[in-house]
Image (tube, helix red, strand yellow):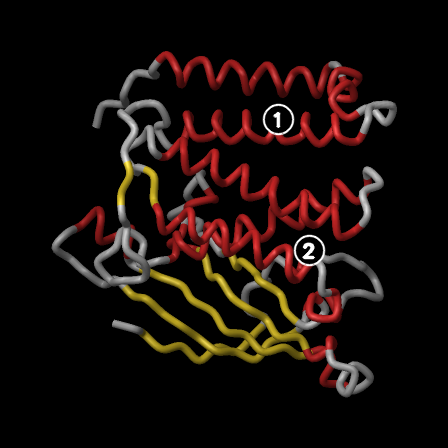
Amino acid sequence: MTRAQPTTPRIISVATLFFLAMLLVIAPPASALLFDNELPRETKVRNLNLLAAGATITWGIINWDYFQESPQANSEDWFGRETDEGGADKLGHLYTTYALSHLYASIYHDWDYPEERAMRLGAFSALGTMTIMELGDSFSKYGFSYEDMLMNCVGAAAGYWLGTHPEWQQRLDLRLEYAPSLSDFDSDVVTDYEHHKYLIALKADGFDILKDTPLRYLELHLGYYVRGYDDYKSYQPYDDRERNVYAGLGLNVGKVIESVWETRIFDYLQVPYTYFPVKHDLN
């Protein structure tokens, strides 16, 4: 297949990315202008959101064909077998907005916002970033999806609620597991749903009655993932599409390694092969 020639918007976006990278690497003081400690925190919030919007649009131009179509809106349905991704993309929107809300909130808290306000601003910033993404989709072959937008709202609400209820944040995680195949690696990891799993983890360590017992290292999982959708798109009518829900008993990796590395990254990312799943194929 002949590779398509780069369009003008794509060339411009690549040049913009290169310029930003050189600006940050060669001239670090330039990046400090956006988030200098002498700037009012409101100005830094504005700068961060503008930067995120620009990065989202640039990524969309390069990877998702933004501005190649007239604006359109589509109903994609939800988790049906005949949908493009079996519903994994809907959970991807929910999870991404949730995780972004906590990332933004952490930055705002470092900029001296009180915890509740930082979390509220974080949820709105995450929703704003994902709304820009969805509006960009409206100018591509994908179109604006009402279902995606609703899941963005659910993700922002979940991020805010857990972020403002620390007792529940110690008990519940929303996580993504990503285990790409070396023979079938997708450079666009954001939408590589064929290798994603989305799950809720209930951690024993978050309950006072269990936190001083050996059970504190364990957790219960409930997750969803799809497989075979990429093959189906490429090799129709061959069809081995799966939509799977699973329950599992796993190790709380963050708790296991906290004596050597105290981090919250494993509240958001699931380490493969650290749990015992029982799956059910919805097909």
| Residue matched to label 2 | 265
Q: Is residue 54 left or right of residue 70?
A: right
Identify whether 251 is placed above or below 24.
Answer: below
Residue depicted at x 78% and y 81%? 211
Q: Is residue 214 left or right of residue 68?
A: right
Q: Which residue was labeled with disc 1?
A: 51
Where does the N terminus fall, quadrant-wise? top left
Query: Residue 149 location in percent, x, y?
Result: 42, 47
Q: Position of residue 199 (x, y in %)?
A: 51, 66
Residues under labels 2 and 1: Cα distance? Answer: 23 Å
CB under 8 Å between discs 2 and 1:
no
Q: Residue at x 42, y 45 (%)?
A: 191
As drawn, 110 above or below 76: above
Q: Residues within 10 Å of mark 1 (few under 14, many from 20)?
A: few
Residue depicted at x 52% and y 59%? 177
- Going by the numbered disc 1, the residue's amino acid type is Leu
What amino acid is found at the position of numbered circle 2 in the picture? Ile
Q: Is residue 208 left or right of residue 193?
A: right
Q: Position of residue 228 (x, y in %)?
A: 29, 58
Dot 1 falls on a residue whose secondary structure is helix
User: Residue 76: x percent and y percent?
Assistant: 28, 50
